[in-house]
Amino acid sequence: MDFLSILQIFDSGTRLATPLLFACLAGLFSERAGIFDIGLEAKILVSAFLAAAVATQTGSVWLGLIAGVSASVVFSGIHGLASITFRGNQLISGVALNFLASGLTVLIGQAWFGLGGRTPGLKPAERFLPLELPFAESLSGVPVFGPIYKELISGHTLLVYVGLLMVPLSWFILYRTRFGLRLRAVGENPAAVDTAGISVVKLRYSSMLIAGILCGLAGVYLSTGLGAGFGKEMSAGRGYIALAALIFAKWRPWYALGATFLFGLLEAIANRYQNIDLGGFIVPVQFMQALPYILTVIILAGFIGSAIPPRAGGQPYVKER
Amino acid sequence: MIRLEKRPSPSRLWTLTTPILAVIATMIVGGIMFWAMGKDPFETIRTIFWDPLFDETFGPYSRPQLLVKAGPLILIAIGLSLGFRAGIWNIGAEGQYIMGAIVGAGVGLAFYPTESVFLFPAMVIAGAFGGWAWAMIPGVLKVKFGTNEILVSLMLVYVAESILASMAQGLLRNPEGMGFPGSRNFARDFPAASNLEVISGTGMHWGVVAAFIAVIFGYVLLSRHMLGFQVRLTGEAPRAARFSGVKPTRLILFCLGTSGALAGMAGLFEVSGPAGQISIDFGSGYGFTAIIVAFLGRLHPVGILLAGLLMALTYIGGELAQLMLGLPAAAIQLFQGMLLFFLLAMDILSNYRIRLTKKGAV
């Protein structure tokens, strides 16, 4: 394997990691506030669909972005309503959202475009196109750094860079602001937060809003950046991989970047090489696809440091009377 | 101001009426949606919920299908309900279902082309074992390391799907299949290993029989047996359960193991009967739909039986609506999702009392 193909794998790994990163950070905000979110998948799916549909109808990718993110926020709101206001089971609400999203996208897609749930292919103006960073061409002659800059760092769509920016931003919000402190506290011990006179409900809803926006960006990127149009079930389990990455990252933003990048890389390798020959032993492609989940189970079991979820995760908060 | 007041124990009346209200609400909202899509709402609802059973032309074909679809759903949901009652959340039944099918089918295919009558029972046991073993992974991890069983069981679904794809293309591929993925077809080529109808023309295959037995087993266990009492006690009052000497370890392994074994059995009955073979797209989501069935049935065996039949009806009705009205197949998923949501939202009525109080009186 030569240097260039390694770079290309890393490059495609970065692209594949981006939707995971957005979704993983969405899950981070939601679970840190004590709301389990199995419905990440659903939010990615509705957002991907609406973004592509609106982009192809209006010809503007920005309107698509707004539509996609709004759809995801609406789903987030439903999840919040069910699990915060109605104090329902968060797990079941997430499962219901996933059913709802895969049904709704195909149904509306079929009624709207009549293509069996697909949207028409997006034209360049209706997509986020790769950005060429300055000096990429002129620096490409420089050994080692030149190709890295040109192949790996430059040439991604805007959302990839936004995703990378979201990591320090999330870290800052969670660990350096009052809001972040409260958000983390509400996931560990909501009663204490309530005693301090801060609204648990309001905090949890704002975490759902943030999760909705981030998940929306994941979906928008999927259908207008990575792909060119929406296809049935196009999220393909990314919400669950993001959930796995979140555990892998032990609910921390910087680790989330590492975990999603690792999983993106695995996907890139699985896409490029069907079966990998390791010294006469053939590793089937399905093993590569299953690897993120297997790694997550191993992490969860605590074989590599312990992953402890936020303590109040999954429990609705009932104010004592 | 509206205020929610927690009931000391869930209201019996509301617990029984909320599923019915949820079904009605789903029909109404579904109808509005179909109307918005330019379809006649009454005709659509009738096609989904009425025609499969009572229409003269489709009825005879659809009615047997009802049992075929309801069988696996009920079988899996009964197992899940035990865990859900005890607060053990196995949401990876889909994975256990797939693994049961793979292991059971593997045993069957290993003995091709025997005609022994013992083969099918052996496959059923192997299928149950496959599901059980797959469920033991989250079980043992939870018991030994305190790992969250929700996440592990969910992750293992995707591992199982990868194994399924690998099996269909590799180890279990039909050697006479001209290189196409997919195993030998049990129903067509291998009668000794196929899951036949017990009474022909009714759709009543061995899996449906097993589902009925599971319902009775679940009912007896929960209402007449010590273990069932412990399951209920753990779910309703974990502290009291610990004081009364319930061993959580045993209970966790029992609940996960039973639900895994039942899901695995369901997988085997499906692969050797209606599905016919191990193929890449074998996992059809029964394991996830069974979660809805368990909840709609209020985690009660009889309720699950009814809910399973209703859910099967939506599947068949959905197929019919696809055929007659050109409705996409995904509409049914939408229906099922809505149903679960309405149920979840209405559950507040059974767990809380709604009080209207004057503002400031709180």
Image (cartoon, coloured by chain):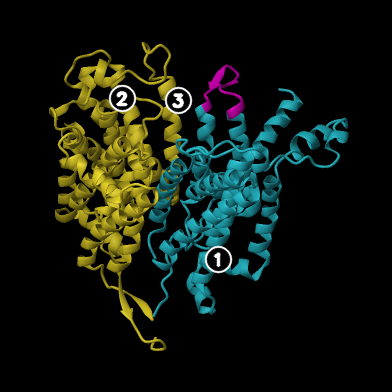
Chain colours: A cyan, B yellow
Q: Can you identify the residue that label 2 sits on? A: B105
Compared to B185, does B350 lie above or below?
below
Q: Secondary structure at mark 3?
A: helix
Determine the secondary structure under disc 2.
helix
| Residue type beneath disc 1 | Ser
Q: Which residue is mark 3?
A: B166
Which stretch is magenta? A271-285
Above/below status of B23 relative to A157 = below
Q: Residues within 10 Å of mark 1 (few under 14, many from 20)?
A: some
Compared across the picture, whether B34 is left or right of A39 comes to: left
Does the magenta segment cover residue A279? yes
Residue denoted by label 1? A206
First-in-chain label (3 vs 2): 2
**How far from the left and from the top, in percent, is residue A292?**
54, 38
Q: Are marks 3 and 2 in contact (CB under 8 Å)?
A: no
Horizontal side, residue A310 vs residue B142: left or right? right
B206, B130: nearer the viewer: B206
Rendered location of residue A211, percent (x, y): 56, 57
